[in-house]
Image (spheres, grey):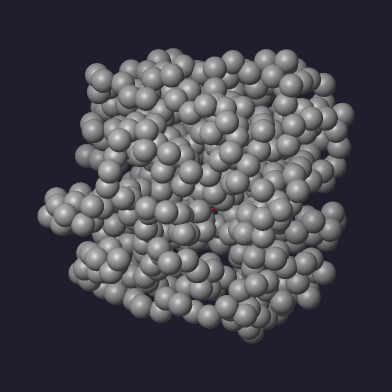
Amino acid sequence: MKYLSTRGQKNTVSNSEAISAGLAKDGGLYTPESFPAITSDTINNLINEPYYKRASYIMGLYMDDFNADELTSYTKQAYNSDNHNSFNHKDIAPLYFIDDTTAFLELWHGPTCAFKDMALQILPYLLTASLKKTGETKKACILVATSGDTGKAALEGFCDIPDTKIIVFYPKDGVSEVQKLQMTSQEGSNVNVTAVDGNFDDTQTYVKAIFSDKELSDELKKMKYFLSSANSINWGRLVPQIAYYVSAYCDLVKKGKIKNGQKINFCVPTGNFGNILAGYYAEKMGLPINKLICASNKNDVLTQFLNTGVYNKNRPFYLTSSPSMDILVSSNLERLLFELSDKNGKAVSNYMAQLSSSGTYTVPDDMKNELNRVFASGQCDEKDTMSTIKTTFNESNYLIDTHTSVAYKVLNDYRKSTGDKTPAVVISTASPFKFCESVLDALSKPYNKTGAELLESLSNATGVEIPAPLAELKGKNERFNKSVTKNNMKSTVIDFIRND
Ligand SMILES: *Cc1c(COP(=O)(O)O)cnc(C)c1O
């Protein structure tokens, strides 16, 4: 399998080269040249397998420079419910049925209680093996800017992985109490966490500047390090996500909810478009998907695009209770444009140039037709996010987080407006305990606590148990309490690496 850059660069690369590089030299994202087939036989073969075997099979279809034993060894370590620091559900990515035709795919039983674990638990294995295969002799320092979930998931994934270091910057006042506690108490000898004075956009902008700082990269080279990214533009983060779409389908068939071959819908709470793009790849492989429903919060740039074919980031930016979806530029959309345009790198380059010069671009009708074939979309405001959490809990005794609530509301709206009764899976991306303040507000429960005590407030109010990795936060010490201004970020990186 060869990988192409979305911006049309001539030379193709292998799977491990794509993972090692992160971004292509022309600024594009690596995408597979073709989509291997999934048939009803594939589903039959995987149906009685545990999650790690389903994942290694699906990933193996793309990662042909890894052999089956290698991949199975990685997935077995990454998706393991016996290991205290891995997943705390035996099915790894279980379905919860709220009624006969609606299930939640719970992707938050990993160590950080959000869906980023599905990819970031395995990425360190894929990255370190890819670096070996491509002959890289320098060590990787993973540099992350986070609005909360990615940082912690990357820290857990790379914690104590040999020959790597990881440094995470987060906006000082831009993450939830629980997210902050999770990061500042991170264990491991190769990690650093630093707060930045500023909001997430600032933090991300400064981190991007560090990535393109030639002087810094030369200095790191002398110390035998290079900077690498764990964010969702890396192919190594995308490919593990295809697996849970297939796994969910297997479980629906296994539980007798659908017949093998029958089409289903997925509704996905979307930010950077990584999660739902993996669903699109699964559809292109032949997984029986009727519609992928893209759910946005008040920042509905994606919904607008899917409805009209016009992407326009010139709009107000809202801070919402589903912060991981607060976004104006969805980086993985570039990979969708590449497929919609029949892998036309020149066209994609043009759209991206228009996006950076004027903030907007429009796709032609043939691309829009393909969008309409697969995608539906909807938007959910703050009031509905709150009321959906409340009614879901009161009527079905099922507690969902703010991001999942956006998706569930959008699915219900979609069903009402279209009459489409296709069985549907809502992708549930975070434990409600990661966003205690918002969920308690939604349930109209008062609280005046902070930190780990908030977890108890939510548990007491609902009778739902605190997930083990969050319950453990209570006894943990804060290891990282430094905050810096943007001018000190570069020296923080250098000091951290020098300090070996
Ligand atoms: C990252 C994240 C999302 C958005 O996922 P994308 O792949 O960026 O679309 C949704 N919900 C939660 C809880 C997240 O952490």
Whole-percent x, y for residue 6 in the image = 33, 26
Question: At 67% across and 31% down in the image, what residue appears?
Answer: 54
Screen quadrant of the N terminus: top left
Please identify the quarter of the rendering in which residue 268 is found. Answer: top right
Judge whether 469 appears above or below 460 on screen: above
The residue closer to the viewer here, 257 or 188, is 188
Judge whether 487 appears above or below 1 on screen: below
Question: At 41% across and 79% down in the image, what residue appears?
Answer: 481
Report the side of 405 relative to 306 (left or right): right
Whole-percent x, y for residue 282 in the image = 59, 26
The residue closer to the viewer here, 347 or 343, is 343
Screen quadrant of the C terminus: bottom left
Q: Could you tell me how many numbered marks the image carries?
A: 0
Question: At 44% across and 25% down in the image, what residue appears?
Answer: 65
The residue closer to the viewer here, 256 or 409, is 256
Please identify the quarter of the rendering in which residue 170 is found. Answer: bottom left
Whole-percent x, y for residue 102 in the image = 78, 39
Report the side of 471 relative to 103 (left or right): left
Whole-percent x, y for residue 42 in the image = 69, 19
Please identify the quarter of the rendering in which residue 290 is found. Answer: top right
Question: At 72% across and 72% down in the image, what residue appears?
Answer: 458
Visible in this render: residue 382? no
The residue closer to the viewer here, 357 or 435, is 435
Q: Furthest residue to the bottom?
A: 448
Visible in this render: residue 107? yes
